Image: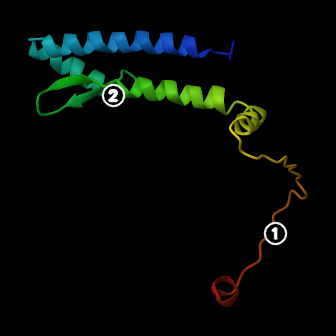
Amino acid sequence: MNLDITYEQVEAKTSAALEKARKTVEFFNSATDKDVKDNLRENLKQNLNKWYMSYDNINDKFILNDILPKLELYNFQVNEVVYKSGLSIKKSCEDNGIETISAEYVRTDDTISTKKLSFKDAFL
């Protein structure tokens, strides 16, 4: 399984899913058969975010929510491109004039000691 997914692949997948959602919304909103709408309504309500939709109870219509795919693309960009490694963050900061330092983290002990504190020690 290839875990190296590019932004373009995610964007294409999101665009395809958004187009499917657009067609589904149009189909539901234009349907006249009450039984079809009742069946679809319950199935679609279970996966609103997955289908990039929201439901309007007052008008009994689904609305395409184009903010969700944008959020998905933004999260991918942040997680996979911007914060993929500490080195890229450090380089980006240095490129923008932010002073950076190198930190070394050392685990000194695997045990956690607990000590019951008195009220006086904890709050005064």
Question: How far across and down, in percent of the image, does residue 118 sit?
Answer: 69, 87
Sequence-wise first label, 1 or 2: 2
Residue that label 2 marks: 46
Q: What is the basis of the colouring in this image? A: rainbow
**What residue sits 89% from the left and 59% below the top?**
109
Identify which amino acid the numbered label 2 is placed on: Gln
Q: Secondary structure at mark 2?
A: loop
Question: How far across and down, in percent of the image, does residue 123 sit?
Answer: 63, 85
Identify which amino acid the numbered label 1 is placed on: Ser
Viewer-nearest residue: 111 or 63: 63
Question: How far across and down, in percent of the image, does residue 9 sit?
Answer: 56, 11
Report which quarter residue 87 is drawn in. top right
Quadrant where the C terminus is found in the figure: bottom right
**What residue sits 71% from the left and 82% below the top?**
117
Q: Is residue 13 above or below residue 107?
A: above
**What residue sits 17% from the left and 24% below the top?**
61
Viewer-nearest residue: 95 or 50: 95
Viewer-nearest residue: 100 or 40: 100
Residue that label 1 marks: 113
**What residue sits 20% from the left and 10% below the top?**
27
As measured in the structure, the alpha-carbon distance from the residue carrying label 1 to the one carrying label 2 is 46 Å
Residue 55 lies left or right of residue 58; in this view the side is right
Q: Secondary structure at mark 1?
A: loop
